[in-house]
Image (cartoon, rainbow, N blue to C red):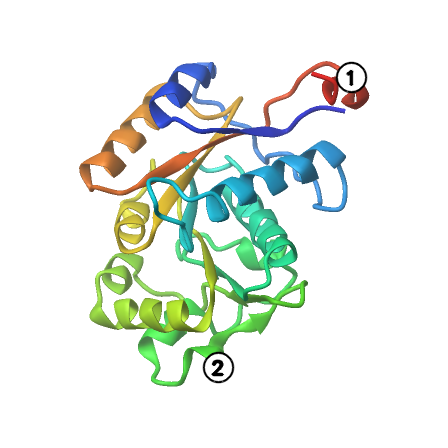
């Protein structure tokens, strides 16, 4: 067994702990472990959800959070899906997972729904936001998929998008957004400024140090609140039972 990710709480320290290889070759696909699979993975997701949504920082409790990777293949969509399911299981309030990765949507597949009418359609059409939601795999979890093709730069900058965010905040107690990699677009900076903060997902064996540092600096320059980072796919060559004693 191996530990697959860990929460790193201070972004400045995180960048010194990544210890990733300076190479262009990345993993073709991160290892995906179902929420009901690896026991360590379940525990770490639970700790992450607790720290983000149930532990106020500076007197502020997060309710609407963006998850994003630094580069493709960091596992942010998988992480977002698992956190959404965990928050739905831990908390009594309703939860909505939103796929804002309009360039390459995958969140719907991890939550076992089709990518039908979703966020892009909701911004263009006048119906209530509930008309675009699908029930998730857990009782109080709903999913807003990415929906039809659209230009994310135009969509996120529109007043209509802000109106839909207000509607989602009024409908749900917790909002968990999946966004494109911070190293490849400015979408997460726009989203993070509109929501409560961003959690960066970093691939232990794929993310390049300088790309991560630049993404962090860009978010800070946009006055985006960084809630922390998750070091994903980190492995420890010790048995699960022994790891639990550490």
- Residue drawn at 38 percent across, 75 percent down: 122
Q: CA distance from mark 1 to mark 2?
A: 49 Å
Q: Residues within 10 Å of mark 2 (few under 14, many from 20)?
A: few
| Picture quarter with the N terminus | top right
Expressed as whole percent of the image width and height from the top left, the position of residue 167 reads: 36, 73
Expressed as whole percent of the image width and height from the top left, the position of residue 173 reads: 47, 64
Q: On the image, which quarter does residue 115 sit in? A: bottom right
- Residue drawn at 28 percent across, 64 percent down: 155
| Picture quarter with the C terminus | top right
Residue identified by numbered label 1: 242
Q: Residues within 10 Å of mark 1 (few under 14, many from 20)?
A: few
Say left or right for 225 vs 6: left
Q: How many marks?
A: 2
- Residue drawn at 26 percent across, 73 percent down: 160
SS at mark 2? helix
**Disc number for residue 131:** 2
The residue most toward the bottom is 127
User: Which of the two discs, 1 and 2, sits closer to the camera?
Assistant: 1
Q: Nearer the viewer, residue 243 or 237?
A: 243
Say left or right for 91 vs 76: right
SS at mark 1? helix
């Amino acid at each position: 067994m191996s530990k697959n990710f860990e929460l790193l709480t201070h972004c400045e320290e995180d960048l010194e702990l990544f210890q990733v290889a300076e190479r262009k070759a990345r993993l073709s696909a991160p290892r995906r472990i179902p929420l009901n699979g690896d026991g360590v993975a379940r525990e770490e997701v639970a700790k992450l959800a607790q720290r983000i949504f149930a532990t106020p920082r500076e007197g502020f409790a997060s309710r609407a959070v963006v998850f994003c990777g630094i580069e493709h293949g960091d596992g942010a969509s998988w992480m977002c899906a698992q956190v959404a399911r965990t928050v739905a299981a831990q908390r009594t309030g309703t939860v909505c997972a939103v796929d804002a990765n309009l360039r390459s949507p995958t969140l719907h597949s991890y939550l076992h729904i089709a990518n039908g009418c979703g966020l892009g359609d909701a911004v263009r059409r006048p119906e209530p936001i509930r008309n675009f939601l699908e029930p998730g795999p857990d009782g109080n979890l709903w999913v807003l998929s990415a929906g039809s093709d659209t230009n994310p730069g135009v969509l996120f900058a529109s007043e209509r998008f802000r109106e839909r965010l207000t509607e989602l905040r009024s409908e749900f107690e917790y909002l968990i957004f999946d966004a494109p990699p911070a190293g490849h677009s400015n979408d997460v900076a726009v989203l993070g400024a509109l929501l409560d903060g961003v959690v960066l997902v970093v691939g232990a064996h794929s993310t390049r140090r300088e790309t991560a540092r630049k993404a962090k600096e860009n978010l800070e320059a946009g006055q985006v609140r960084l809630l922390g980072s998750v070091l994903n796919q980190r492995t420890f060559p010790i048995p699960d039972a022994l790891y639990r004693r550490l």
